[in-house]
Image: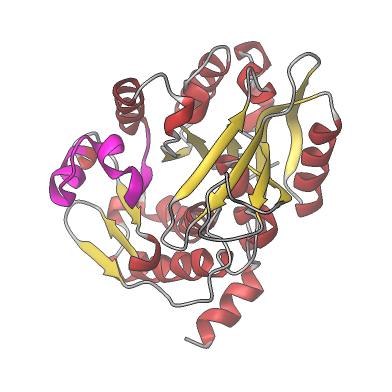
Amino acid sequence: MSDVICMGELLVEHVSTASNVSLVHSPGFIKAPGGAPANVAVALQRLGLQAGFVGKVGDDPFGVYLRESLADTGVDTSFLFVDREARTTAVYVAVWDDGRKDLCFYRNPGADMMLTAEEISDPIFDGARCFHFGSISFIDEPSASAQRKALQMARDKGLMISYDPNYRPTLWPDEKTAAKVIQDYFQYCHLAKISEEEWQVATGYQDLEDGIQAVMAKGVELLVISRGENGAIATNGNYRIELAGLEVDVVETTGAGDGFLGAIITELLPAREKAGSLAAIGEDQVRDALKTANAVGALTCKKPGAIPALPTRAETDDFISKL
């Protein structure tokens, strides 16, 4: 049984060996497992919660590689399905120190797009306390229907719902479609995490205050904003906590936001179960959670690849103790 069920894309990342260069000029790539919801699952597992992952890979060597990579971290892969026709999705990634990314996806279609509603069943949620999802699975059918079904089941079962839009422009038909879909799903979550570079598409506003109000008006209990080297923000609509970023030697930023969110869930899920709502958790406790999340995000930047870079609880605690 898993404490948190994460659902969405699991893919092979080919990460540029050089920072601050485009894919065109990258001299080479390092293979790593990735995909935002999968990254969150591994972050949760390494920080102390049992995570399960729901998704689909191809019947190919990369699919085997991804299943083994997740299983090796302890994440439950019982509901990681295999598609016999579509290939496992791959993405080539080049990153800049300021968080910008150059991405090229290979998924026409990718196996992650082929998850069906029929494959979503009650046993997935046995013992679960939280359901985490992103927006990528809503782009295409049949995965969109599968994720909508899972989201409704999680809501019916009273789970805490966590949502990270994770906007990837090249995967959507256009920005207007992406904005509408992404913004629609805030109404279904208790915890929302938005990165600074996705702010306008995710909220509909460029202004920070207007965007916060728009998201909170949809019923979100706690909104966290990851801002890379500029730190992070958390708000329940009444208070706002702002923390500065932590200085580390940045190797690569892929997965930092996912590690950040994994830490927020790990720290605040038990507190929500006691308080009844994330909005009711004390400001000091949320501030402590944000500090831990900042640390996890910073540590993730110190190694290449997303999943390989995510820190353990011991590594995180040791890092924080030296701040």
Asked if the stretch drawn in magenta spans residue 136, the answer is no
Q: Is residue 49 above or below residue 190?
A: below
Q: Is residue 99 above or below residue 283?
A: above
Give me the residue at 52% from left, 25% from top.
Answer: 137
In front: 229, or 145?
229
Give me the residue at 62% from left, 53% from top.
Answer: 306
Q: Name the image quarter holding residue 299.
A: bottom right
Colour scheme of the picture: secondary structure
Q: Position of residue 228 (x, y in %)?
A: 40, 61
The image shows a total of numbered marks equal to 0
Span shown in magenta: 189-214
Q: Position of residue 130 (x, y in %)?
A: 52, 41
Q: Position of residue 124 (x, y in %)?
A: 66, 29
In front: 304, or 216?
304
Q: Name the image quarter holding residue 34.
A: top right
Is residue 171 shown left or right of residue 54?
left
Give me the residue at 78% from left, 13% from top.
Answer: 85
Is residue 179 shown left or right of residue 288?
left
Asked if the stretch drawn in magenta spans residue 211, the answer is yes
In front: 227, or 240?
227
Give me the residue at 65% from left, 11% from top.
Answer: 118
Say if residue 307 shows up in the picture: yes
Q: Is residue 151 above or below residue 69?
A: above
Q: Residue furthest front?
A: 25
